[in-house]
Image (spheres, coloured by chain):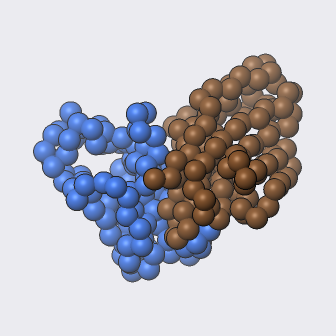
Amino acid sequence: GEDVEQSLFLSVREGDSSVINCTYTDSSSTYLYWYKQEPGAGLQLLTYIFSNMDMKQDQRLTVLLNKKDKHLSLRIADTQTGDSAIYFCADRLAYGNKLVFGAGTILRVKS
Amino acid sequence: KAGVTQTPRYLIKTRGQQVTLSCSPISGHRSVSWYQQTPGQGLQFLFEYFSETQRNKGNFPGRFSGRQFSNSRSEMNVSTLELGDSALYLCASSPDPNTGELFFGEGSRLTVL
């Protein structure tokens, strides 16, 4: 079945860039997403990219997609302590709103 | 605009009981999805509803069921609760049934003793 994998933990210093990586197996992916979850909260959609795009930039966020290698990354520029959270990569299957999520990457930002 | 509202936020049940969780989507959103989040299995898709019809279903046993009403509000039910059903149950609504742009509620945390 479809699978999404992420590294589990990333620690960076405030002001540095963070890069969170994700790989997926679904060959028919149409959209890929990054969601953020803060403690005690639900998930918040950060950004998404169409599968026919290589890059998308949205303020401090840059998403890179390598469709050949099935690799997705999220770069957060000038990382702040408020960015500390769990970041989930997700893949939308071809039909409907069913998403397959990775296990999440815990981002810790040190001041 | 109010966000996705889930009730109850916390509940404790014992094995064998049943539970009903409720979700009110953002006004105007007709697509509602449910996910189970556990430390061991992560986020797993339960089901998705659009205009009162179930469009997708995840790999969960028949004890897990759901429905959507004409006002787009949704409920999910778990019967004959097991210890392994302890989890955060997240509801998400979407303005479009085909983009994966989900707006999540804060979840209902179920503990089964």
Give x and y (percent) for residue A66: 76, 50
Which lettered chain is shown in blue? B
Q: Position of residue B6 (x, y in %)?
A: 43, 55
Where on the picture, by quarter, is residue A38?
top right
Residue sitting at x 28%, y 62%: B65
Question: Considering depth in this image, is B95 or B45 the residue closer to the camera?
Answer: B45
Residue A101: x and y in percent read 54, 48
Residue A70 is at least partly visible in this image: yes
Q: Residue furthest top?
A: A111
Q: Any idea which chain is the brown one in this picture?
A: A
**Name of the residue lying farthest toward the left:** B16
Residue at the location (22% across, 59% down)?
B62
- Give me the residue at 78% from left, 32% from top: A18
Name the side, left or right, on which B87 lies relative to A85: left
Q: Is residue B29 above or below residue A75?
A: below
Q: State whether residue A33 is above or below residue B50.
A: above
